[in-house]
Amino acid sequence: MKRILFLTLIVLTIFSCSRVRESGTEKTIPYLWFQLQNGKFESIKGPKDINHVNLLPWTVQEYVADSIVFDSAFYLAVNGHGIASLSLKGIRNGNFPEFRYFYDPLIFRYKTITLLFPYRDSIACHLYFNEMLNVVDSRDLKIQGISLVRLVPRYENYRFIIIPFQKENPEWESVGFIEETSNVFHIEWKYSGSSSTRFRYSRLDTSTMKEEGETREEYIASYRFKNIDEIEDSSLKKLITTIKNNLVKVNEKSVIHFTVRDTGGYKTERYVYGNDRDIAKKDYTLQEIKIISDSPEKNISMALSKDPQRDGKQRPAIYISRKGEKRPEKMLLPPLPEDFQYTGFNFFDDRIIVFWEERNFMDTGASGMLVLEL
């Protein structure tokens, strides 16, 4: 807290600006940089000031794994630690953003977080223990056999959500967790034994906590990919078409998976673009694009993608599509150091929050986020 109060006095010295030229106009975008350091978001001036972090398997390293807007507040899943909240209320008056940390090492340390989603009056979090990519043995964990926990912000504590299958089989881990609706999820269970590895699949309704088994084919089908031609929302279709054209311009054999999610994590839609012939021959480059919308109205949708430059390189960008506008707006993101990349984003309170990481194959190093004006 003392650090936050101190930084409010010097906030003007750490704001940076990025000049972006689009459609013949130049737009100045103030932004704030933060690096995760031992679970805390510490302010830095920019990419050149990122502190070195030893590489660890991505399954246990700290980074922002997901985020949602819940009850007019912004929450982030911080891998290995738990859930944090971000308040931007005072930022217009020159005050520094404020963070609150709801961390519990007994629950989250050495676990991998995949998803946040609203659950009744709380924020639910899916996590699992990755046996293969870890730095400890499962027998060293203080708490085992837990895949879902929920945070009730006003009580500042976690409560367990017990899945029927895991209650009877605590040695199995839920390594896959696919949203069908805000209440229904498809789960891939994995058992890692000394002599064998086994998988099972189930469908869980969190509103009733009823679970039923399903086949692997049913689990895979739960992704429910649609062709981009099936998009009905005109604003979303313009956004996806723009990105598709950019990516195909660089690589004609691109297969693109678009994941469209609303800011609150209530609904997820998935679309695919690709040449059937290339897919059948397995001769393609898979690219995944994350899109956030203010569903259900979808007055605005945003995508994290890349923009082809004249020198042949691609620069990361946020594309913003609003209803009534002819084409999406493009917001170029500041370049990151080598081996770093932007990994996800969300938007809240007229700000875009973009997450970044240092990646080296299966390992992750430094990570953090960038806050931009919308």
Image: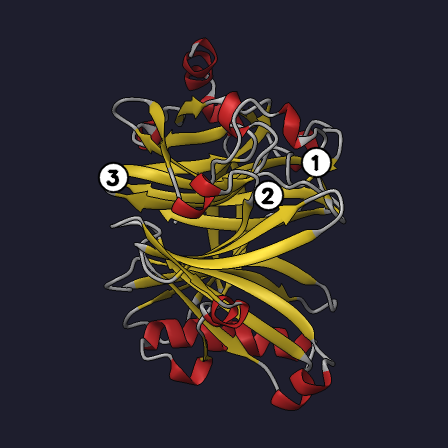
> Disc 3 and disc 1: Cα gap in Å?
35 Å
Structural crowding at the residue carrying mark 2, measured as other residues with C-alpha within 10 Å and reported as few (<14), some (14–19) or many (≥20): many
Disc 1 marks which amino acid? Asn
Q: Secondary structure at mark 3?
A: loop
Using the rendered view, name the quadrant where residue 261 is placed. bottom left
Disc 3 marks which amino acid? Ser
Furthest residue in direction top, as rendered = 2
* Of the image marks 3 and 1, the number of the one nearer the N terminus: 3
Q: Going 44% across and 72% down the picture, which residue do you hit?
A: 224
Q: Going 36% across and 76% down the picture, which residue do you hit?
A: 326
Residue 55 image point, x, y percent:
75, 34
* Callout 1 touching callout 2 (CB < 8 Å): no
Q: Going 57% across and 39% down the picture, which residue do you hit?
A: 171
Using the rendered view, name the quadrant where residue 320 is placed. bottom left
Judging depth in this view, the residue of 115 and 248 nearest the camera is 115
> Disc 1 and disc 2: Cα gap in Å?
22 Å
Q: Secondary structure at mark 2?
A: strand
Q: Mark 2 = which residue? A: 356
Q: Mark 1 = which residue? A: 134
* Callout 3 touching callout 1 (CB < 8 Å): no
Disc 2 marks which amino acid? Trp
* Of the image marks 1 and 2, the number of the one nearer the N terminus: 1
Residue 6 image point, x, y percent:
45, 12
Q: Mark 3 = which residue? A: 72
Residue 351 image point, x, y percent:
38, 44
Q: Viewer-nearest of labels 3 and 1?
A: 1
- The colour mode here is secondary structure
